[in-house]
Amino acid sequence: MPIFYGKATKAINFLQDKDKTYLAKFKLGIKTDTKDITGEILKEEKSSVKKKEFEKVLELFLGKIFQIPPMYSAVKVSGVALYKLARQGKVVERKEREVLIYSLKCLEFDEEKQEGILEVFCSSGTYIRTLVEDIALKLGTYGVLLELERTKACGFSIEESLKIEEVKRLKEEEKLEKYVKTIDEIFRDLGKISLSLKEQEKFLNGVRLKIEGMENFKEKDMVRVYGEKFLGLAHNEDGFLKIDRIFC
């Protein structure tokens, strides 16, 4: 989970809809009220799905799919979070939501235990619990999530992260700073525009600029803007550079 502080908090809204990658451990043959193993078991049966069957059905869930948010979720209906209603034993109608599944890989599948591990690369808002259950239903059985690990978010991977204990130790040793990323690193996947000192002054004063190189970006494409240093984010609007956020 990326943590922002200082001026970097201004960047949060620009990252909250980023795609994510998960490792999801699942088990077939069980249905719970929460769609994961922590919930109350509602149904249980012997499942005998083969690995090849499981891998084949994954193809049906690639691309644009629709999900119904689980009752045990933070989605609000009439201003009330679904999980609060679920704890009262209530079930209400929920609207389907469109999500994108870019890739689904079965990394492991134990046919005897009917357990496995999925790698899921998906859009923000995807419920992995629901995905597991829906895959299981296509196979004619039930399914629950056993464990979930987010391995990529906001363009950062788990390999770049630190545990709380490590953060505390590095802070005490005054070595934490070298692990802190600059704001422009957050947007490293975006294109880049460099301004002269005169253009920089105009940009910081909110003037729309006709900049050489903007023709390389599509309409509404967001780019990183640099002058003497990283200045902020802007986008292409009718061939002009228009400010989205200043960070300097």
Image (cartoon, rainbow, N blue to C red):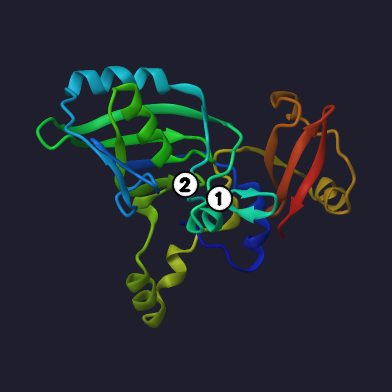
Q: Which residue is mark 1?
A: 186
What type is the residue that disc 1 sits on? Ile
Residue at the far left in the pictured view? 112
In the picture provided, is 148 more to the left or to the right than 20?
left
* Residue 245 % position (x, y): 75, 51
Residue at the far front in the pictured view? 89
Q: Is residue 186 above or below residue 221?
A: below
Q: Is residue 11 above or below residue 213?
A: below
Q: Is residue 122 above or below residue 234?
A: above
Residue 166, image quadrant:
bottom left
The residue sitting at 46% across, 34% down in the picture is 122
What type is the residue that disc 2 sits on? Ala
Task: Compare marks 2 and 1 and give the one earlier in the sequence.
Answer: 2
The residue sitting at 36% across, 34% down in the picture is 133
Residue 241, image quadrant:
top right
SS class of the residue under badge 1?
helix
Q: Name the mark nearer the viewer: 2 or 1.
A: 2
The residue sitting at 60% across, 47% down in the picture is 15
* Residue 234 % position (x, y): 75, 42
In the picture provided, is 212 more to the left or to the right than 80?
right
In the picture provided, is 75 more to the left or to the right than 86?
right
Q: Which residue is at the front of the view, 37 or 167? A: 37
Residue 143, image quadrant:
top left
Badge 1: few (under 14), some or many (20 or more) residues near its Cα, within 10 Å?
some
SS class of the residue under badge 2?
strand
Tell me the tag on residue 153: 2
* Residue 132 % position (x, y): 35, 35
Q: Which residue is at the front of the view, 135 or 89? A: 89
Badge 2: few (under 14), some or many (20 or more) residues near its Cα, within 10 Å?
some
The residue sitting at 69% across, 37% down in the picture is 222
